[in-house]
């Protein structure tokens, strides 16, 4: 097992999962698309500045620009935009659980369209992770989760799957932080346009809003995305994506602590199954094409 990659993956999963709770706090006091666009504008500018200080260039290859553009649109504008809108109606833990279905979608898309293969142990881990997600999600939906919010989160998971596969072309050649900053600026521009047509921007100033906005800008926004791009380059999309199975583990836990969302026995059992699935996939030897 690559212990450094495992540590990076665990850190990424916690930072990424905590964003569902901070997003829930933000949308309580601000319009979702406008606030997300502002977050990406700030994160993107910081990312580009840090990249320049690190000596990185924005002179990317055509393949890198194409992948960076797709990543910015699909992950930032679509995946996170849909989730921010959905969390006006669904709990942060529900959004985190749905997002954790992405590894299976990545594996299926890689097999169907890119010719990648999974060894039996890796496939068993993916199935276990999916079973854990299904167990938790089934209980939440039967408990009254909003169907429209759930549908938006599912569409977001599909967009994130495409973004995860698209970033392959952007990781070769380095410039990781520059790519992170640029794809955030692309997502910001798209979200500002969408916000102008879809919603009337509003903000109700509060200390929780300010704290949540700063946190989600710097930690899940900038730092987690930087780690995510490194993971994709180090592990490939299938193995890197399995860390999203940990979204229910951290997402449900953080939401329970900070928002008082209920943590049930079914959640705990599902989380245990998901954790086993993660370990199986990460310890299984994958083909070189991953």
Image (spheres, grey):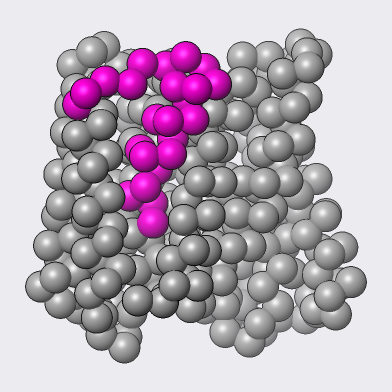
Quarter where residue 125 is shown: bottom left
**Residue 70 seen by the camera:** no
Q: Is the magenta stretch mostly helix, strand or loop?
A: helix
In the rendered picture of this protein, how many numbered marks are placed on residues?
0
The magenta stretch spans residue 132: no
Q: Where is residue 195 in the image (x, y as percent from the top left)?
A: 66, 30
Q: Quadrant of the C terminus?
A: bottom left
Q: Which residue is drawn at 18% across and 16% down?
A: 142
Q: Position of residue 229 (x, y in %)?
A: 56, 67
- Give the left or right position of residue 259, taking residue 115 as reference: right
**Residue 242 seen by the camera:** yes
Who is closer to the viewer here, 45 or 50?
A: 50
Q: In which quarter of the image is the N terminus?
A: bottom left
Q: What stretch is highlighted in magenta?
A: 243-266
Q: Where is residue 54 in the image (x, y as percent from the top left)?
A: 84, 75
Q: Which residue is drawn at 50% across and 46% down?
A: 14
Q: Which residue is drawn at 52% across and 63% down?
A: 8
Quarter where residue 6 is shown: bottom left
- Give the left or right position of residue 277, taking residue 51 as reference: left
Say above or below: 286 vs 33.
Answer: below
Say above or below: 16 vs 145.
Answer: below
Q: Which residue is drawn at 80% across and 45% down?
A: 42
Say above or below: 225 vs 34.
Answer: below
Q: Position of residue 13 (x, y in %)?
A: 47, 50
- Give the left or right position of residue 115, taking residue 55 as reference: left
């Amino acid at each position: 097992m690559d212990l450094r990659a495992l540590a990076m993956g665990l850190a990424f999963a916690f930072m990424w999962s905590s964003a569902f709770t901070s997003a829930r706090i933000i949308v309580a006091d601000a319009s979702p698309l406008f606030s997300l666009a502002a977050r990406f504008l700030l994160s993107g500018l910081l990312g580009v500045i840090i990249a320049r200080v690190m000596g990185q260039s924005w002179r990317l290859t055509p393949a890198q620009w194409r992948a960076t553009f797709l990543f910015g649109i699909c992950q930032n504008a679509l995946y996170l935009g849909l989730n921010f809108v959905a969390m006006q109606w669904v709990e942060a833990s529900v959004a985190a659980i749905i997002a954790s279905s992405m590894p299976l979608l990545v594996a299926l898309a890689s097999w169907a369209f890119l010719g990648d293969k999974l060894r039996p142990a890796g496939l068993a881990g993916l199935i276990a992770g999916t079973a854990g997600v299904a167990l938790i999600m089934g209980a939440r939906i039967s408990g009254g989760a909003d169907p429209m919010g759930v549908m938006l989160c599912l569409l977001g998971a599909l967009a994130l799957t495409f973004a995860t596969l698209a970033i392959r072309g952007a990781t070769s050649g380095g410039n990781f932080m520059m790519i992170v900053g640029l794809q955030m600026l692309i997502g910001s521009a798209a979200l500002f346009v969408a916000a102008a047509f879809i919603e009337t921007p509003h903000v109700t100033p509060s200390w929780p809003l300010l704290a949540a906005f700063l946190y989600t800008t710097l930690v899940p926004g900038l730092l987690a995305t930087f780690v995510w791009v490194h993971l994709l380059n180090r592990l490939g999309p299938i193995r890197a994506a399995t860390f999203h199975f940990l979204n229910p583990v951290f997402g449900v836990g953080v939401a329970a602590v900070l928002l008082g969302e209920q943590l049930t026995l079914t959640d705990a059992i599902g989380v245990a199954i998901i954790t086993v699935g993660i370990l199986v996939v990460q310890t299984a030897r994958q083909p070189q094409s991953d």
